[in-house]
Image: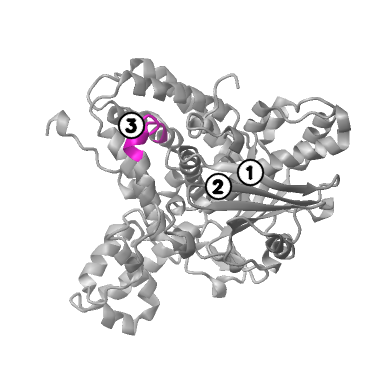
C-alpha cells in the first residue's frame, strides 16, 4: 500500500471502551452544544425575551424564544426566593432557585398559568407534550452574592472568583424524552434541528444561561439602584451553566448500547478521516497549533479538589507542555501528518493528553467531519430484536469477541463483584452500594453486562452449538438480555464497556465524564467517585452576539481573555 492509499482505521473498541479511556474523553467538534450553536448561527436563528416579570426579591417568570427557520422554541423560566435551608443539589430536593421548561412553540397566557402550577414542582408536577424538557437550577451562593453586591455598588466582579467557580447557577437535572409527561423523543426526532442527540436539552441550557445573566443584572439593579452596573460582556461570556450529575446518568451508556456506540463510532470515524489525510495545509496546522495554546489556557482554569481529578489535570498540564515542546519538531509537511501526531501521542502522553490531541485534530476539518453529526442518533430499532435463528456457536463467538476479557474472571471474588447497582425506593434513582456490606443484592439492577456474559457463556458451552438461539432462550430466559447485547455488537462495536462495572474499584465518574464530554462539558470536578460538577457553555456567545464567526471555537479561551 502506498502512502497515497493509506486509510487509517478507527481505533480498536477494545482500547477505546476501557473505563480509564472513557474517563479521559474531551469535548470536540461533534459535541452536542457545538452542533447546536453552529446550526443556530448558520440558520440565523432569532432570539427574543417576550416576558421578564421578576420582582426585587427575585421571584417571577420569564420567557425566552428561539425562532428557527421552521419553528420556535421557548424557555419558560420561574425564579424563586429559596430559603438557604432548602437549597440542595441532591435529587431528593423539592425546591430550587429556578425551574424551567422548554416549550414547543410560543406559550400563551393560559400555557403560562398551567406551567406555573407544575414546573416549579418538578417531579411532583406534570407537563404535557408541548413541553420538551423540564429542569431546575440552584445558585452558586458565594459567587452569586459576590457578583450581585459588586454590580450593585457599580463595580465588576473579581476575575479570580469568576474563574474559580465558572458559573452563577448549576442545573441539578435537565429531563427530557417523555419524563413527567414531556414529549417523547419520537415527537421531535424527525425535525432537522433535533436530529442530533439532546438538542432540545442543549437549547434549554443555552437559554437558561441568558436568563441567569439577566437575573443577576436585575437583582443587582434592585439592590443598587442607580449605582448598579450590568455585568460586562467579556465577564458574562466567561460564565457558563454548572451542572451537578450523579449516578442517575452512569447507567445510561450501559442501557443504550446502540446510541452510545453511535456517539463513539462517529467520533472515531472523524478521527480516522483526519488521520487519513495525506497533506495538511499550513493554515490547518497553524489553526491546530493555536488551539493547543488556547487549550492550555482552559486547562489552567480547571479547578478541582478531588485527588483523582487533580492528578488528571496535572498529567494534562504536563502533556500540553510535552506537546508544545514537540510541535516545533513535528513535520507537518510529511505524508499523513495527523496520523504521525496521533501515533506520537500514544507513545508520549497520558490517556488524557492522547484524547485531547485526538479531539483537537478535528478542529481544522469541519467540512470533513461535521456532517457526521447526523449519524449520532439511534435510528436502528431493529437492532433490539433477537435473532432466534442464530446458532449458539455464533452467539458464543460474539460473546468471545466482546467479552473475552471477562470470561475467565472469578465472579465470586469480592474484588470482582464488590459493588451492586440498585434503584432507591424513595426517588427511583440509580444507586451503587457495597454488595457485601449492605442488604442490596436482592434489588440489584442488570448493570453488569460482563458478569452476565460470563454466566451466559458458561450455560452456552453445555449446549449443542448448532442449536438455535430460540430454543436455548426457552430454557434459559434469564440470558435473553445478554444474547440481545451480543447480537447488537454486530452493528455496535463500541456499544460495550470493556471493563467491570461492579468491581470493588470501579469509578462511576468515568462513565459520567464519557457521556458529558459528548454534551460538550468542560472542567469536570468530581466531588466523589459517584458525582461530578461540570460547566456548560462557558465562553459561548449570548444569543444577541451569536454569529457564524463565533459560533464554534468559543470553547477554547483566547490567551489573555
Label 1 sits on residue: 48
Residue 81 on the magenta span: no
Residue at mark 2 to residue at mark 1: CA–CA distance: 8 Å
* Mark nearer the N terminus (3 vs 1): 1
Q: Quadrant of the C terminus?
A: top right
The numbered mark at residue 67 is: 2
Tag 2 near tag 1, CB within 8 Å = yes
Label 3 sits on residue: 342
Q: Quadrant of residue 176?
A: bottom right
Instruction: Say whether residue 84 is visible.
Output: yes
Q: Left or right? Give the position of 521 relative to 329.
A: right
Q: How many C-alpha atoms fall within 10 Å of the one at disc 1: few (<14), some, or many (≥20)? A: few
| Circle 2 SS class | strand
Question: Which one is closest to the eye, mark 3 or mark 1?
Answer: 1
Q: Is residue 487 above or below residue 4?
A: below
Q: Is residue 86 above or below residue 312?
A: below
Q: How many C-alpha atoms fall within 10 Å of the one at disc 3: few (<14), some, or many (≥20)? A: some
97 and 163: which is toward the camera: 97
Tag 3 near tag 1, CB within 8 Å = no
Tag 3 near tag 2, CB within 8 Å = no
Residue 556 % position (x, y): 52, 29
223 and 104: which is toward the camera: 104
158 and 283: which is toward the camera: 283
| Circle 3 SS class | helix
Amino acid at each position: 500500500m502506498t502512502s497515497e492509499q493509506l486509510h487509517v482505521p478507527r481505533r480498536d473498541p477494545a482500547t477505546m471502551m476501557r473505563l480509564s479511556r472513557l474517563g479521559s474523553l474531551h469535548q470536540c467538534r461533534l459535541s452536542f452544544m457545538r452542533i447546536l450553536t453552529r446550526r443556530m448561527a448558520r440558520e440565523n436563528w432569532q432570539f427574543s425575551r417576550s416576558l421578564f416579570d421578576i420582582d426585587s426579591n427575585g421571584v417571577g417568570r420569564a420567557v425566552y424564544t428561539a425562532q428557527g427557520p421552521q419553528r420556535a422554541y421557548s424557555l419558560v423560566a420561574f425564579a424563586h426566593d429559596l430559603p438557604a435551608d432548602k437549597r440542595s443539589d441532591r435529587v431528593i430536593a423539592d425546591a430550587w432557585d429556578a425551574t424551567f421548561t422548554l416549550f414547543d412553540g410560543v406559550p400563551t397566557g393560559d400555557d403560562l398559568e398551567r406551567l406555573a402550577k407544575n414546573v416549579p414542582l418538578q417531579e411532583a408536577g406534570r407537563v404535557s407534550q408541548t413541553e420538551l424538557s423540564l429542569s431546575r437550577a440552584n445558585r452558586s451562593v458565594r459567587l452569586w452574592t459576590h457578583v450581585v453586591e459588586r454590580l450593585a455598588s457599580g463595580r465588576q466582579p473579581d476575575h479570580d472568583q469568576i474563574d474559580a467557580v465558572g458559573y452563577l447557577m448549576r442545573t441539578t437535572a435537565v429531563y427530557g424524552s417523555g419524563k413527567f409527561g414531556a414529549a417523547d423523543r419520537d415527537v421531535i426526532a424527525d425535525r432537522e434541528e433535533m436530529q442530533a442527540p439532546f438538542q432540545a436539552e442543549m437549547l434549554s441550557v443555552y437559554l437558561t444561561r441568558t436568563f441567569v445573566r439577566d437575573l443577576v443584572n436585575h437583582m443587582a439593579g434592585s439592590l443598587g439602584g442607580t449605582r448598579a452596573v450590568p455585568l460586562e460582556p467579556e465577564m458574562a461570556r466567561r460564565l457558563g451553566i454548572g451542572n451537578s450529575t450523579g449516578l442517575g446518568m452512569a447507567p445510561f451508556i450501559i442501557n443504550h448500547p446502540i446510541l452510545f456506540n453511535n456517539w463513539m463510532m462517529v467520533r472515531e470515524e472523524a478521527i480516522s478521516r483526519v488521520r487519513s489525510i495525506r497533506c495538511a495545509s499550513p493554515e490547518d496546522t497553524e489553526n491546530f497549533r493555536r488551539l493547543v495554546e488556547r487549550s492550555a489556557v482552559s486547562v489552567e482554569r480547571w479547578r478541582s479538589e478531588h485527588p483523582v481529578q487533580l492528578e488528571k489535570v496535572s498529567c494534562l498540564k504536563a502533556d500540553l507542555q510535552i506537546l508544545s515542546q514537540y510541535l516545533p519538531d513535528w513535520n507537518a509537511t510529511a505524508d499523513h501528518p495527523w496520523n504521525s501526531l496521533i501515533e506520537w501521542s500514544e507513545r508520549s502522553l497520558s490517556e488524557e493528553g492522547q484524547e485531547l490531541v485526538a479531539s483537537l485534530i478535528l478542529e481544522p476539518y469541519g467540512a470533513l467531519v461535521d456532517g457526521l453529526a447526523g449519524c449520532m442518533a439511534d435510528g436502528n430499532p431493529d437492532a433490539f430484536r433477537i435473532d432466534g435463528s442464530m446458532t449458539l456457536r455464533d452467539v458464543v463467538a460474539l460473546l468471545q469477541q466482546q467479552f473475552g476479557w471477562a470470561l475467565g474472571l472469578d465472579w465470586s471474588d469480592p474484588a470482582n463483584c464488590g459493588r451492586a447497582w440498585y434503584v432507591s425506593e424513595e426517588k427511583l434513582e440509580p444507586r451503587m452500594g457495597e454488595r457485601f456490606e449492605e442488604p442490596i443484592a436482592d434489588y440489584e439492577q442488570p448493570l453488569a453486562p460482563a458478569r452476565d456474559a460470563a454466566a451466559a457463556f458458561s450455560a452456552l458451552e453445555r449446549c449443542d452449538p448448532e442449536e438455535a438461539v430460540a430454543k436455548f432462550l426457552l430454557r434459559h430466559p434469564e440470558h435473553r438480555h445478554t444474547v440481545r447485547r451480543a447480537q447488537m455488537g454486530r452493528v455496535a462495536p463500541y456499544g460495550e464497556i470493556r471493563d467491570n462495572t461492579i468491581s470493588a474499584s470501579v469509578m462511576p465518574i468515568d462513565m459520567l465524564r464519557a457521556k458529558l464530554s459528548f454534551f460538550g462539558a468542560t472542567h469536570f470536578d468530581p466531588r466523589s467517585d459517584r458525582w461530578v460538577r461540570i460547566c456548560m457553555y462557558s465562553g459561548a456567545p449570548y444569543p444577541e452576539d451569536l454569529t457564524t464567526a463565533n459560533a464554534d471555537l468559543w470553547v477554547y479561551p483566547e490567551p489573555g481573555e
